Image (cartoon, rainbow, N blue to C red):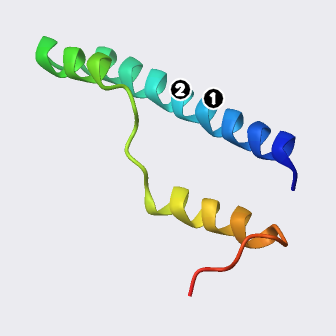
Amino acid sequence: MDNRDRLILALAAQLRAERQTRQAFAEAVRSGLGREVMVAMLEDPVPAITQLDLLAADAVAASAPHYPRAA
């Protein structure tokens, strides 16, 4: 995996996070959450990292021959 491949993976992850943020905000609007909740979401739009995200990152890292596996 070269630098270009890592950049593509990083950009794909960023796009996925932005989509999840927009979906969460749309759901908040649809469900009628209060103004304070929506302001908080807009001020800190980064979604929380889940266990699935960590497992996916570990799988990508483990598949690259020059990345050591975590012990």
Q: Is residue 32 visible?
A: no
Residue drawn at x 37%, y 25% as measured from the top left: 45
| Cα distance in 3D space between marks 2 and 1 | 5 Å
Q: What x and y, as percent, mark residue 26?
A: 40, 18
Task: Left or right? Give the position of 60 relative to 64.
Answer: left
Q: Amino acid at mark 2?
A: Glu
- Residue closer to the observer: 9 or 68: 68
In the rendered image, the vertical position of residue 64 relative to residue 17, given as above or below: below
How crowded pointer 2 is (Cα within 10 Å; few <14, some 14-19, many 20+) is rated as: some
Q: Secondary structure at mark 1?
A: helix
Decide which of 20, 60 is in the foreground and name it.
Answer: 60
**Do labels 2 and 1 touch, CB within 8 Å?**
yes
Q: Is residue 26 left or right of residue 17?
A: left
Three-letter code for the amino acid on which mark 1 is drawn: Leu
Q: Secondary structure at mark 2?
A: helix
Q: Position of residue 24 (x, y in %)?
A: 39, 28
Residue 41: % across, % down: 28, 23
Circle 1 Cα neighbour tier, 10 Å, few/some/many (<14 / 14–19 / ≥20): few
At x 67%, y 40%, the residue is 10
Residue bearing the label numbered 2: 18
Residue 39 visible in the picture: yes
Q: Quadrant of the N terminus?
A: bottom right
Q: What number is the disc on residue 15?
A: 1
Eyeballing the image, is 64 above or below 50?
A: below
Image quarter of residue 29: top left
